[in-house]
Amino acid sequence: MTESANVQELINLYVVPWAINIAMAIAIFVIGRWIAGVLLNVVDKMLNKAKMDSMLISFVHSILNALLLLFIIIAALDQLGVDTTSFIALIGAAGLAIGLALQGSLQNFASGVLLIVFRPFKVGHFIEAAGVSGVVEEIGIFSTRLKTGDNREIIVPNGAIYDGTITNNSARDTRRIDMVFGIGYDDDIRKAKEIMQGILDADERVFKEPAPLIAVAELADSSVNFNVRPWVNSADYWAVLYDVTEKIKLAFDDAGISIPYPQMDVHLNKSAG
């Protein structure tokens, strides 16, 4: 066998198969990346059509892109004859270790995704959650940022919010104001009700329907307590609460109706000398 024949045989045995495998691996990578791009565009359009949050769309895009790229690389390496079994096992072990190390962060991430998807509140809503309250300024993947009434910033982990009770004070267009006013036992109940009813009727922000409730709720130790419950737009809640409270107090003062405070009468018995 001549030397040229030996070279040709070596080329046929090693070079050609390797060249074919390399070409196939490159083709798998290129075509795989193209298919991944098409899939990512489809997913992005579906999420945008569903009006998902832009931050969530970007995050899902990044995660899917990384997973698809990893799958494509493994497929290309497998075409080259590389044993990918141990590689996959190594990735799984590393993922498990990272998951255990970042357990709290992953919980906050999962809660953030659920908050963005199900939207129990939106930016601009006033909420009470995780023992704090404030206006929502930002809903992030791992935490939510609130602004309090005195302009403080509170950053709350999403896990603490989603695992607890969420009170959304801005979810509904209307709200009921629950107020309690007490008068003395010697004061005129009918007159007090007329005064409170007149103040509510004169306030244009108070709804006529449903009509405000004014009712004697309790005969307390030192006072006769009224429940006063008008309905208003959610945006007017605090303003009406403060205004009505002040007007009722001033009107009671002008009408001579007392707002008693807790007190105790002490009787002394004098023994005969």
Image (tube, helix red, strand yellow):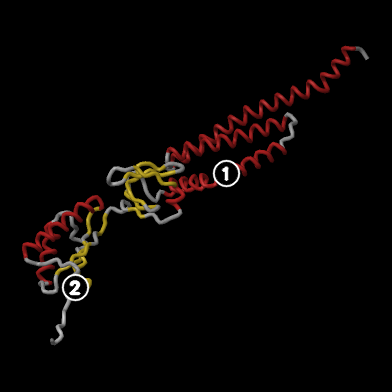
Q: Tell me what residue is drawn at x 15 percent, y 69 percent.
A: 183
Q: In the rendered view, does 3 fall on the left or right side of 17?
A: right
Single out the residue that lies furthest toward the front. 273
**x%, y% of residue 132?**
36, 51
* Residue position for label 2: 264
For the N terminus, the quadrant is top right
- Alpha-carbon distance for marks 1 and 2? 61 Å
What type is the residue that disc 2 sits on? Met
Q: In the rendered view, does 44 fall on the left or right side of 133?
A: right
Image quadrant where residue 96 sits: top right
What type is the residue that disc 1 sits on? Ala
Q: Tell me what residue is drawn at x 51 percent, y 48 percent.
A: 107
Give whichever of 265, 63 is nearer the camera.
265
Q: Residues within 10 Å of mark 2 (few under 14, many from 20)?
A: few
First of labels 1, 2 by sequence position: 1
**x%, y% of residue 161?**
42, 51
Give whichever of 99, 240 is nearer the camera.
99
Q: Residues within 10 Å of mark 1 (few under 14, many from 20)?
A: few
Give whichever of 245, 27 is nearer the camera.
245
Secondary structure under tag 2 reads: loop
What mark, if any, has residue 101 been given in the picture?
1
Single out the residue that lies furthest toward the bottom. 272
